Amino acid sequence: MTWSTHNVVNQPHPLSNSNLFTRDVALCEAVAREGAGWDREWLASVGLQLGSAESLELGRLANAQPPELLRYDARGERLDEVRFHPAWHLLMQGVCASRLHNLSWQPDVPPCAMVARAARFILHAQVEAGSLCPVTMTHAAIPLLQTHLPPPYAGWRDSLLSDRYDAHHVPGSQKRGLLIGMGMTEKQGGTDVLSNTTRAEPLGARGPGEAYRITGHKWFFSVPQSDAHVILAQTPQGISCFFLPRLLPDGTRNAIRLERLKDKLGNRANASAEAEFQDAIGWLMGEEGEGVRLILKMGSMTRFDCALGSHGLMRRALAIALHHARQRQVSGRSLSDLPLMRAVLAQHALQLEGQTALLLRLARAWSAPASEHERLYARLFTPAAKYGLCKAGIPFVAEAMEVLGGIGYCEESELPRLYREMPVNSIWEGSGNVMCLDVLRVLKRQPGVLTMLHDEFDAVKGCNRHFDRRWRQLRLQLARPQEAMARDLTQDLLRLAEAAVLLKVAEPPLADSGCARLLDARGQRVLSEDLCSRLLLRASAA
């Protein structure tokens, strides 16, 4: 055919083959500032790899071909296995090589390992977020397992600290790397784990490290292909924590029956199952009745990862929108040069500047648990960050879709997948109200938390009038915190924490604009042309 209907022009190329780390100036600065500059070379290398067209295609494939449950083999024998697309396994090799599941617990790791891990987590989230679920739970479980690993599985310690991914269905003692899942939620309870009906009965002696028979179910059994799960079950002393291996010490399958995989809105590359325990064998971790206390230690870490993951998704959405706007022409001008679009993009870049600064500051607090000030900072602002950042992600990605227009709404774009991925971080590990009630609990029950807040916020008092006014108002609320106002209180705390970090580390024009965006009751202000240019350059440096 020698004729055509039209020539394809003014259609931007997709964003690929870019360095996800070096192009994010705010992240580069925060890594150095918060004590993890030693990891810059690794981050730059991983950022280049993750930004490649090949890595991005792996993320697409893993979601386009979700996992499949194999309940039986050809002979009718129970399998209870999950089959993944090869892209999933390649992604898992990458996250394990980056040690997202154990970097913080390495015996010879440099200082501020949590900061380096947070940066690595943000980078991986931009490619495929579902593969972060297994490493998130493993990372949170390792400190608990280092203390409470049952005697038959004592040989797992080295493999838990490995950088290898091993998907073989063999005993853990024969594997090069191990992953741990979690099982808390039941049909009748959800967040209310005290209403769990799964029960545990001792096979012999009672007590820590002893074997129990587990009977019951889990409505959400995360990452069912894991080598073991940390679960909750009822004992005479109350909710207790158990180590539930996939294979028993003799290599036989534990009686964990996978009923089905969840058909989820997003997070489709990752498997979430419904499971039943038909006299499965688990080992008690800690004392009977200590389950909630032990699980909460894990929960705080996984909540921090939820905030990191949402931020990574937002970062990718902004990068896609900026890349498109710089190529797309409207009336002979680049879309990114039009004043209104430029203002929208700059405001989103400013939003991520504050988030990046806060999250890496929070990671530093996680790196210094021996400091009471840092412990309280992490304990308070982790649920606050999960609440605020995870909720902010949904409208953020929707706005990025608008920058691209119709093609941003189509599956060929990455944005629909990012949009579907966003709500899970708000829901998993406790939804919005749970996070706000946890913040309230910290304010009421943790001695010294108000002193910590004064130390943090008074350090920048007088630097910005919006900050000073909101801090005065918040001090009055903190005197008598009310449950019905927990959402407003949590949001105010988070905004002040973000503004305080910006006032400490950012240039005055950027810090002042960030404070106005966060704290000025009149809403967003028009940014100067110079600041717009600077923000957009920092958001996607060449």
Image (cartoon, rainbow, N blue to C red):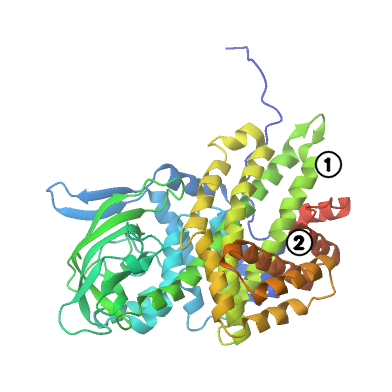
Find numbered disc 2 in the image and state the secondary structure of the residue it sits on: helix
Residue 339 is marked as 1
Tell which of 477 and 49 is nearer to you: 477
Q: Is residue 421 left or right of residue 8?
A: left
Q: For this view, does 27 lie left or right of residue 206?
A: right
The residue that mark 2 highlights is: 519
What is the three-letter code of the residue carrying label 1? Pro
Q: Vertically, is 104 above or below 521?
A: below
Up-down: is 250 above or below 222?
below
The three-letter code of the residue at mark 2 reads: Leu
Q: Tell which residue pokes out farthest to the top in this image.
A: 2
Question: Where in the figure is residue 246, as x and y percent of width and height?
Answer: 26, 66
Mark 1, secondary structure of its residue: helix
Q: Quadrant of residue 407?
A: top right
Which comes before the other along the chain, label 2 or label 1?
Answer: 1
Query: What residue is shown at x 18% (from left), y 85% (from top)?
Result: 205
Q: What's the CA distance linking mark 2 and mark 1?
A: 24 Å
Q: Residue at x 71, y 30 (%)?
A: 10
Quadrant where the image shows the N terminus:
top right
Q: Nearer the viewer, mark 2 or mark 1?
A: 2
Residue 273's disc is none
Task: Determine crowd level at label 1: few under 14, some 14-19, many 20+ residues with C-alpha closer than 10 A.
Answer: few
| The furthest residue to the left | 75
Local crowd at mark 2 within 10 Å, few (<14), some, or many (≥20)?
many
The location of residue 74, given as percent across then percent down, is 15, 46
Q: Is residue 411 above or below residue 125?
A: above
